[in-house]
Image (cartoon, grey):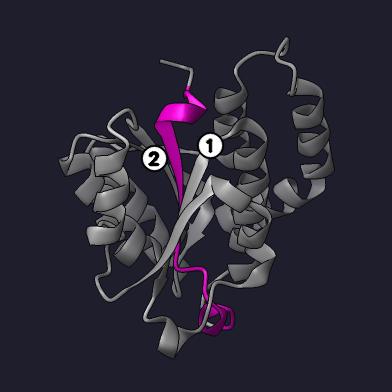
Amino acid sequence: MSFLNPKSTILLVCDLQLRFRSAICGFDHVVATANKMVKVAKLVGCEVVASEQKAQVFGPTVPEVGLDSLGPVLITKYDKTLFSMLTKDLDNVLEARPSVKDVILLGIESHVCVLQTALDLRARGMGVHVLSDGVSSINRQEVAPALELIRQHGGFVTTSESISFRLMRDASASNFKDFANLIKEEKERTKSTMEALSS
């Protein structure tokens, strides 16, 4: 199915924290994609969940992600020690929203927290859509095997622009003009991110 219903989809932002900025390959590009998707989520009404890995040690989510702009669209931001985002916090969110069938997943690291989150959610029967321009690791060579393993378990690997259009669906929608303007504004940043994370 080409369409993703924003009302039955949650955007997951995994561990984009301050202390990781200097360690993760292309961290600022991942953050740029996260910020773009936060804007898209707010525009289409797709709820957002963010995690932080041991925030006392690794710091808060970097402000450039833009979580503070979301208002009620941000369901929760929670601290975790598990590598997977599927802790009791996220489990409670999903239990309270039985209509949610899909998640869009971005963040770090591709082969650890992102991978384990994707596999856990696939085991739960969720549709998992991982953004190739929204994930990275300390060593970039870890990314491709992690994405391949996610595919092998039935997850989908896509891009921020592709998933954004799937959420929007229809050019006749009342918010399409704002959406088109957002895509245009993000054009150069999207291009540079794709080049940096796919090269």
Could you give the CA–CA distance between mark 2 and mark 1, rounded to whole angstroms? 10 Å
Residue at 76%, 51% (x, y): give it.
Answer: 189
Task: Say which label, 2 or 1, has the lower sequence index.
Answer: 1
For label 1, the crowd category at 10 Å Cα-Cα, with few meaning under 14, some 14 to 19 and many 20 or more, is many
Residue 32: x, y in percent? 67, 58
Q: Amino acid at mark 1?
A: Cys
- Residue 102 in view of the camera: yes
Residue 82, image quadrant: bottom left
Name the quadrant containing residue 172.
top right
Residue with the mark numbered 1? 46
From the top left corner, tell me how far across and down residue 122 is, in percent: 22, 41
Residue range of the region highlighted in magenta in the rendering: 4-22
Asked whether residue 19 is drawn in magenta, I would say: yes
Residue found farthest to the bottom: 57
Q: Please, what secondary structure does the residue beneath circle 2 have?
A: strand
Query: Foreground mark, 2 or 1?
Result: 1
Q: Which mark is residue 103?
A: 2
Q: Please report the residue visible at 65 percent of the width from the left and 61 percent of the height from the top.
A: 68
Tell me if 64 is positioned left or right of 93 in this view: right
Q: Is residue 147 left or right of residue 179?
A: left
